[in-house]
Amino acid sequence: MKKQTNKAGQDKIDLQALKESETRFRSIVLWSPDAIIVTDAKGKIEYMNPAAERVFNRKVESFIGKDFGQPLVDGESTEVDIFRPGKDPGVGDMHVAEVEWLNKKAHLIIIRDITDRKRAEEALSVSEVRYRQLFELAKDGILILDAETGMIVDVNPFLTEMLGFSHEQLMRKAIWEIGFFKDIASNQANFIELQRQGYVRYEDLPLETADGRRIEVEFVSNVYTVDHQKVIQCNIRDITDRRRAEEALQELKERFRQVAENAQEWIWEVDGDGLYTYASPVVEKILGYKPEEMVGTKHFYDLFHPEDREALKKSAFEVFAKKQSFRELMNRNVHKNDETVWLSTSGVPILDKKGNLLGYRGADIDITERKRVEEALKASYRFLQIAYSHMEISPLLEEFVKEIKNYTGCTAVGIRILDEEGNIPYQTYKGFSQSFYELESPLSIKSDKCMCINVIKGDVDPKLPFYTEGGSFYMNGTTRFLATVSEEEKGDTRNMCNKVGYESVALVPIRLKDNILGLIHIADPGEDMVPLNIVEVLEKAGLQIGTAILRKRAEEKLKKALLDLERSNQELEQFAYVASHDLQEPLRMVASFTQLLEKRYKDQLGQDAKDFIRFAADGANRMRNLINDLLAYSGVGARGKPLEPTDCHTVLGQAIVNLSMVIEENHAIVTSDELPTVMADASQMVQLFQNLVGNAIKFRGEESTRIHVSVEEKENEWVFSVKDNGIGIEAQFSERIFVAFQRLHSREKYPGTGIGLAICHKIVDRHGGKIWVESELGKGSTFYFTMPKRGGVK
Amino acid sequence: MNTEDKGEPFDILLVEDNPGDAKLALEALKVGRLRYEAHVVEDGKQAISFLRREGEYADAPRPDIILLDFNLPKKDGQQVLAEIKEDENLKCIPVVVFTVSKADEEILRAYDLRANCYITKPADIEQLFKIVRSIEDFWLTIVKLPA
Amino acid sequence: MINEGKIKLADILLVEDNPGDVRLAKEALKESKLLNKLYQVEDGIKAMAFLRQEGEYSDVPRPDLVLLDLNLPRKNGREVLAEIKADETLKRIPVVVLTVSRAEEDVLKSYNLHANCYISKPFDMEQFVKVVKSIENFWFSIVKLPPPGDK
């Protein structure tokens, strides 16, 4: 500053002005928020304002005289890093000016601490990058609209990709101008609405892409302000796949639900302890419990029948421990209403990724009905078996009682049989007390009144609830029932069963068609032991018992008759045998001595005497032959031996030996084919062949006798034939000749009693065969007989 | 051939209850050329007594051959046969069972009881004679009898 | 089977070691009406084996009649006779002792062993043949042989 002339006053005014100027500039410097530093030309710090202290976080004193340390170029503004102890480095905006300071060259450095601003800028920059990146790289489509104009301001690559439109196609267009957005904002009005709503969300919006694909998107839009400008940001997510997955899942769920609810099986899941975690609604139908009553509350073993529970529980957990699947295990359960339900259970283990058991899931089928049917079938079959066994009536009935008891599970079963006097005593019983038996057994249909009597008489009215179509009486709670009946209605029925404590009673008739032979009495102190389906099975048993009894009775009668017949036959044959034997002897005497007489004294006898003797001897001989024949004939059955393998060559041979004389005398030739071995009585076979061959010789023709024995093998029998070239037999007599003592010729011409063929017939008959003849008068005969093939012989 | 016969007649014991049959047998024997003496007993008991020379049969000769009918009263033929063949002294005497029955069981039983042979009595007298003669021929001329 | 006037009737077992006698026996039987099959063994051991149907004799039939010589090698006829008559199933088979010996004790011993009959072989050939024929005739036409039973 230059000195002024008005010295004193001028000086005073100048001083004042200087002071004011100084103060002014001092304030500026002192109060400047920016750091002001003055260095000499070389950079040595001569002055620092308080702000510099703050900026550098050091006391001014420490700086004065120190080198600034930074190249100073006048007129430059640079960004510098500020290092300050105790604080993070900062950033400053440094401006250097060359000035004159106290008449020297100096640098005036002004440093503005722009650390915060820088940070903010950086942060903003980072943030901007970040957000830009998000926008660019987002896996959702982002659309930015100008809220006022509806113009698309920005579109991220994902969206262009998704929609198949290019960035250019979309930018600067109004949203409603883009076809596919029409759904959202088909016109400006809608758009305004959109704008107004602020937040809009479409869960599920169908859009069409540039190439015509339909996709589904989730559309969320938000309105907010940026730089005083309202924008709408739309986030668009392609949820097509998700949708599809959702739909598939939904379908699956629906499928499962339908299956679970409509299947016969009920589907369940339990945890590792057996506690139900899921039960399909069908369970209510099967076990009476709603799913809610089971899930989280019941264990699977809580439903088992108490008798089976421990054992089943044990084996179930053994399976759990082994993590095995199981199929169709049958188990007895208890319905909510206490009835027994049989289930067939299948299940598979649920394992986590490590293979640990989480629980089981499976399905059960109600097989109660099936089991009932099975039991009924088994019982029916068993009844049938018993009915057709070879047991006598008493043990038969006992078996039935046992089986009925087994099938029904009732404590007492008895069978009453009607006898000729009208009594219906118990033939057999099990489970009734002795006193009951003694009291109840002697009932009679003639004198007593009782349900038993009604059933046996067939006095049942199927319209009443305790009678069946099959004629049975059944009641599953006698006390309950009687309580509903008035005293008069009860009348004089004895109700003995109820008095003794039987709640379940059934009386099932034993019948053969309409003929009632007795009844089955079933009783149990428990209720509901004889439901209708069981009674119906028992009615079948009743039929079978009836059939069996009648059959056995018939068999017994038959047996007895046969025995009687047998005995009578034997007596007869015995008689015939003895008689014949004893008759033989005197005859022999007569025959022998008349012969002797004739021989010894023939020279002394006149012709008459000779004739007399001859007739006598003849008679005796004939009688002897007749007796022999009778003996032979009766002997076929009576003295027949058991059948054994017999070689027909041997027996034919023997027959021929026996006929050797007569064969020789007649120069007969007997031939045969290969003959088989048959099951026969050998001596009778000899007799058979002997008679047939003998006959063939006896009834010989003119030419020399030729007899041929042959055999034909059939599937089940042998057909023998004895063919001769004798006189033959007229067809009309072909059957008569087999009758005892039937002769076709006079005794003079052809001797014989006429029993030979009858014996043959009897022998063949005894062996189970048939005998017949084919013949033509004058041309010879062929006698055929069959021998059945029996076991043991080919 | 019994060429060493001492000139004594053969003793034939006939065990037969039927006098008719006995007579016939004797008649048949008569026809032969051999010298013989026939002794007839009517039942098994007598037969045994004869053979053991008991009672009235104390002087009975030892038969060279026995013709035994099975149909006997009192002791039946099979029993007699058994007793004879079990007796040390008597068992060597040939016993020809000569009876009515043809039954296999009887025949078998006879052989099992040690009958020397079994022959069925024929009804025909011619046959009867023939057979008796054959017995005579075979047993008394061909066979060597025990002394 | 054709009947040529001969009928198979029975089986005879000839226990004889003398081939000459065997031949004669065969000749004698050839002439008869009855066709009997003659089997022959030459010693007692074979005889028993035959009767018991053992070894090489497993297929032979049970003979209906045994003609037994007492003088046999290896096992003599007396032993054979005793064995046969001691055997439950064989004892019923008629055994005709046909041997040289005329000795009383041989005769008695044989009968005591239950020989069915004892015949001493004649010296004369012709007689021998006659004897065999008589045996055959008596035992197969007159006598009822024991029934076959269990052959």
Image (spheres, coloured by chain):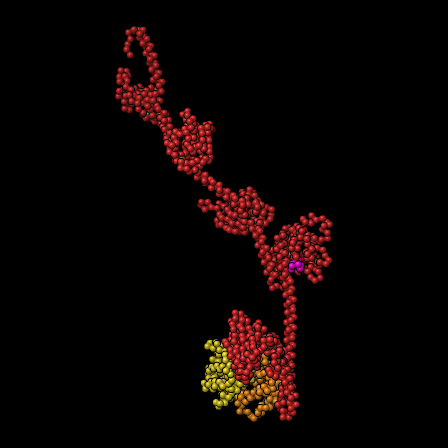
Chain colours: A red, B orange, C yellow
Left or right for A396, reference A16: right
* Number of numbered callouts drawn: 0
| Quadrant occupied by the N terminus of chain A | top left
Above or below, A385 against A360 in this view is below
Q: Residue at x 46, y 84 (%)?
A: C17
Above or below, A81 against A365 in this view is above
Q: Quadrant of residue A552?
A: bottom right
Q: Bounds of the magenta span? A: A510-519
Residue A63 position, x and y percent, is: 31, 22
Residue B53 visible: no
Q: Quadrant of residue A290?
A: top right
Q: Residue at x 60, y 85 (%)?
A: B124
Residue A186 position, x and y percent, is: 45, 31
Q: Is residue B59 magenta?
A: no
Q: Is residue A517 magenta?
A: yes
Residue A781 visible: yes
Residue A753 position, x and y percent, is: 61, 80
Q: Quadrant of residue A152?
A: top left
Q: Residue at x 51, y 86 (%)?
A: C133
